[in-house]
Image (cartoon, rainbow, N blue to C red):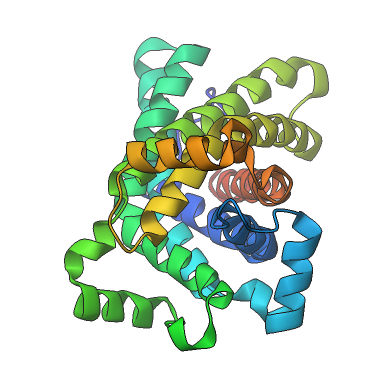
Amino acid sequence: MGDKKRKPIPGWLNFVFGGLSGMMGISVVQPADLVKTRMQLMGPKGDKSVISTISGILKNEGISGFYKGLSAALFRQATYTTSRLGVFNSLNDFYSSMYGVPSFPVKLVVGSVAGGIGAFVGNPAEVALIRMTADGRLPPEQRRNYNNVFNALARISREEGRAMLLRGATATVTRAMVVNAAQLGTYSQAREQLLSTIGDGIILHFIASLISGLSTTFVSLPVDIVKTRVQNSAKGLGQLQVLRSIIQQEGVFALWRGFIPTYAKLGPLTVLMFLFLEQWNALYYRLTE
């Protein structure tokens, strides 16, 4: 995502810029992510509308309810997004220096690899995030009431064993490989294709991000809802068990439940993340050239 004619940004800065961009973006879209998670955890008897989910959160938890799990969301970005964007940009720069501009299939593969690595690194934060955002939908006596992400990680390790922090790691990695192949690969390709028409700048980054966010939402939702159910399960169910159960009990279209709040989160997050990332990159070049 850097200009191939320029000297590549140092590898360690790719990781720093990626993490900062993700954390800045998630701070804005956390409410939509919480609504999406609550909808994904509803069974076949739950009220599945966006409006009722939002009104229920407002009624039972107030405005602050939309920001439950924010510390976990920030920590997830600090681990997961730092890793995935850093690995993607580093691999992209390496490939470009060796073989020239990567093709779209190569970008998809690089995005998939980066996503898998990032997801494994960020899985403990992912488990804490799902637990914290799901807590408000439970009866008061069943809520875990974690104070923050570090309290959640410590209590999960102590009360349920450290292995619980890797609960759903396979599902998380699967989702991340799909998401990042779509998000990073599509953004990079759209940016490249539109560059000669629009010219470099915020408008280009914005349009490429919108294209990336929409395609990512569509392809990622089925694996995302499976991952969410696996990580919130008390019985340690596998991906195939959860997938089969959703299709049998709720229908195939349940795999795209929460499309609106997911895009309301993923669309702006993609836009903000790449806008912030491009600005960090531009700042680096302004200071070093």
- State the image coordinates of residue 183 (x, y, percent, origin top left): 56, 33
Quarter of the rendering occupied by the N terminus: top right
- State the image coordinates of residue 112 (x, y, percent, origin top left): 40, 29
Nearest the eye: 283 or 212: 212
- State the image coordinates of residue 24 (x, y, percent, origin top left): 61, 61
Residue 278 lies left or right of residue 109; in this view the side is right
> Could you tell me which residue is drawn at 46 percent across and 69 percent down?
72
Q: Is residue 133 above or below residue 238?
A: below
Nearest the eye: 32 or 228: 228
> Could you tell me which residue is drawn at 66 percent across and 22 percent down?
190
- State the image coordinates of residue 133 (x, y, percent, origin top left): 53, 69
> Could you tell me which residue is drawn at 71 percent across and 36 percent down?
205
Q: Is residue 6 above or below residue 69?
A: above
Nearest the eye: 96 or 173: 173
Q: Is residue 174 above or below residue 59?
A: above
Residue 26 lies left or right of residue 214; in this view the side is left
Res. 166 in view: yes
Nearest the eye: 283 or 119: 119
Q: Quadrant of residue 234?
A: bottom left
Residue 63 lies left or right of residue 172; in this view the side is right
Residue 128 lies left or right of residue 217; in this view the side is left
Quarter of the rendering occupied by the C terminus: top right
The number of numbered badges drawn on the structure is 0
> Could you tell me which residue is drawn at 70 percent across and 74 percent down?
57
Res. 102 in view: no
